[in-house]
Image (tube, grey):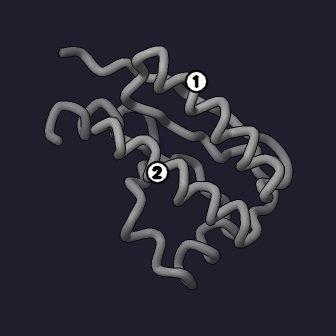
Amino acid sequence: MLPRIKVLKPEGIFDNGKSTQFRQQIGELIDQGVNVILIDLKKVTFMDSSGLGGLVLILKMVRGVSGRLFLMSLNDQVKMLFDLTNMGNIFEIITDKSELEEKLKNP
């Protein structure tokens, strides 16, 4: 079965409000059969702990349907948040879309 991929590109501050909107959107995508989600964080200027917590809930939702969640383009502040919380080991973080294709070929 071919993966059904959706790329999401949040902008600005990724906090509880933004992550709640994202969870709803991703729930709808999962209902439509999307099983691979790539969140491109290039335009996220700041992420707080509630935004990170929201990403963890999103990850659980996606894994709950045997899907995969990838994060891409983390800025320095977001990378630091991931490093401080050891979340970099939990999420699949990639550098570009070609790396996504490679990871999908070799799960």
Q: CA distance from mark 1 to mark 2?
A: 14 Å
Location of the C terminus by quadrant is: top left
Instruction: Give the residue pinned by disc 1.
Output: 28
Left or right of 88, for residue 99: left
SS at mark 2 in the image: helix
Give the image location of residue 15, x and y in percent: 79, 58
Q: Quadrant of residue 79?
A: bottom right
In the image as oriented, which residue stretches furthest toward the left?
106
Q: Residues within 10 Å of mark 1 (few under 14, many from 20)?
A: few
* Residue 101 tag number: none
- Residue beneath the point at 30% across and 21% down: 3
Q: Nearer the viewer, residue 16 or 45?
A: 16
Give the image location of residue 2, x and y in percent: 24, 15
Q: Residues within 10 Å of mark 2 (few under 14, many from 20)?
A: many
In the image as oriented, which residue stretches furthest toward the bottom?
84
- Residue beneath the point at 54% across and 55% down: 57
Which amino acid does the dot numbered 1 rest on? Glu
Which amino acid does the dot numbered 2 rest on? Leu
* Residue 59 tag number: 2
Looking at the image, is mark 1 or mark 2 earlier in the sequence?
1
Left or right of 77, for residue 38: left
Give the image location of residue 52, x and y in percent: 64, 64
Give the image location of residue 83, x and y in percent: 53, 79
Left or right of 11, for residue 22: left
